[in-house]
Image: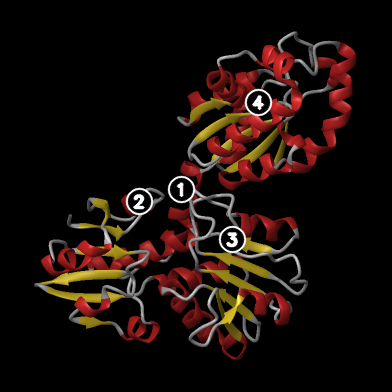
């Protein structure tokens, strides 16, 4: 490996795609077990590497030189081999700083809670301290040791926090439904930052956005730090304009397009057309349910009832939503369970295909809308939810190609 990233578990990593947009070197993903870390570093068979969980602190003893900023932080995420000497840097610092500024702006005099005590936590602490939140910074850990407070103490005594930064891996793929912190009692909260970048929107970030709080997960941080790391690898000055450009490109490649709406509103046909013009994979949740059970949906409803179907639908959506770069056509009733919406939002932008009632046709393969009366009832029950949960509402009373092109134009703008 000449350039790449090392860590213990990296199936979630986007780093290869990101670095391919910054420079022309070959960048690899390499999982290393803790017992093999020392041998890998001592072999020095690389030009430049990034270091991620859980090795940002563990690599330090093997380095010949550490930059002042990395030394101050106590964590290294970028190593360069110069004539057999290993030089360590912390480009996460600039990535975290850029993310905070992009999401919220300056945080001078704000009370900040930092979740976690690892390398990224140290980086976050250094960043917010340098941004003049230095007198009101608390680290939160499960143990409460080493000048930290426990989660219980945070919930009891520090609900006036204005900024929360998660540096733990809680909520990271594949455990997308987990959340690092319960923010419900933090009524003064103004900003939530999550260093986790896969999924694109963690549960912590979603819970903040649902309250109208500024929040962002770690994809922009990852993109920005990669720009700075690449500059260290190549010995060139960092091009800061690449941070936003690379982030936008990776986001549009990785994010799913999710279609919601009534049966017969065009989700499947529009989805297939979108798959052709975006090169994303098309997935239909109803089809996935049929594959899983071997039973068509009307028969499943008849044999097992709606409650069992909804539970199965929930399980399928949870698994599908973890995968990136898809067009997802959903069943008409998926929005009845808000957990489905949260799962779909974790990696997706939601589009409501709004087809007027008079243009919807009852079909026998839709058990809850098989006749005109039941279709109209479902429409009245669900319409406000479709509108509420959509990131964008698309008029689907038009030719399929027009609808698909409108969604593509909105998605890639």
Residue wearing tag 3: 216
- Is 145 situated left or right of 112 in this image? left
What label does residue 403 carry, if any? 4
Residue located farthest toward the bottom when viewing the structure as drawn: 135
**Between disc 3 and disc 2, whose residue precedes?**
2
Residue 287's x, y, as percent? 58, 20
Secondary structure beneath dot 2 equals loop
Q: Quadrant of residue 82?
A: bottom left
The percent position of residue 260, horizontal first and vertical second, equals 69, 31
Q: Residue furthest left?
A: 83
Element class at badge 1: helix
Residue at mark 4 to residue at mark 2: CA–CA distance: 30 Å
Q: Which residue position is annotated with label 1?
A: 249
Q: Is residue 58 above or below residue 174?
A: below
Residue 243 pos. (x, y %): 44, 61
Residue at the image point whose x is 56% and y is 75% from the top: 114
Q: Tell me the residue that label 2 is attached to.
A: 21
């Amino acid at each position: 490996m000449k350039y790449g990233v090392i860590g213990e578990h990296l199936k979630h990593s986007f780093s290869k795609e990101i670095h391919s947009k910054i420079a022309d070197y070959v960048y690899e993903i390499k999982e290393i077990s803790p017992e093999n870390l020392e041998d890998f570093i001592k072999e020095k068979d690389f030009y430049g590497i990034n270091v991620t969980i859980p090795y940002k602190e563990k690599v330090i003893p093997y380095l010949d030189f550490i930059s002042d900023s990395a030394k101050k932080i106590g964590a290294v995420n970028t190593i360069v081999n110069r004539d057999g000497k290993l030089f360590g840097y912390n480009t996460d610092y600039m990535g975290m700083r850029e993310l905070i500024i992009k999401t919220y702006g300056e945080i001078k005099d704000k009370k900040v809670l930092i979740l976690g005590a690892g390398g990224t936590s140290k980086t976050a602490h250094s960043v917010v301290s340098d941004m003049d939140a230095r007198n009101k910074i608390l680290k939160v850990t499960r143990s409460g040791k080493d000048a930290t407070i426990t989660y219980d103490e945070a919930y009891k005594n520090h609900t006036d926090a204005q900024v929360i930064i998660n540096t733990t891996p809680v909520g990271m793929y594949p455990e997308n439904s987990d959340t690092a912190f319960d923010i419900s009692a933090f009524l003064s909260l103004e900003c939530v930052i999550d260093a986790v970048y896969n999924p694109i929107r963690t549960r912590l970030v979603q819970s903040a956005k649902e309250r109208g709080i500024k929040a962002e997960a770690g994809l922009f941080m990852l993109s920005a730090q990669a720009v700075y790391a690449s500059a260290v690898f190549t010995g060139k000055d960092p091009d800061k304009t690449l941070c936003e450009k690379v982030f936008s490109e990776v986001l549009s490649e990785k994010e799913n397009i999710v279609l919601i709406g009534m049966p017969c509103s065009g989700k499947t046909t529009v989805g297939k057309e979108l798959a052709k013009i975006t090169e994303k994979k098309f997935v239909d949740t109803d089809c996935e349910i049929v594959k899983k059970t071997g039973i068509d949906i009307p028969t499943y409803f008849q044999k097992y009832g709606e409650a069992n179907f909804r539970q199965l639908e929930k399980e399928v959506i949870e698994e599908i939503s973890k995968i990136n770069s898809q067009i997802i056509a959903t069943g008409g009733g998926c929005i009845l369970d808000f957990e489905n919406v949260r799962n779909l939002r974790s990696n997706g932008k939601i589009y409501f295909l709004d087809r007027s009632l008079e243009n919807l046709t009852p079909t026998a393969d839709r058990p809850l809308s098989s006749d005109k009366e039941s279709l109209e009832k479902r429409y009245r029950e669900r319409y406000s939810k479709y509108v509420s949960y959509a990131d964008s509402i698309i008029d689907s009373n038009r030719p399929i190609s027009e609808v698909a092109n409108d969604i593509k134009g909105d998605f890639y703008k």
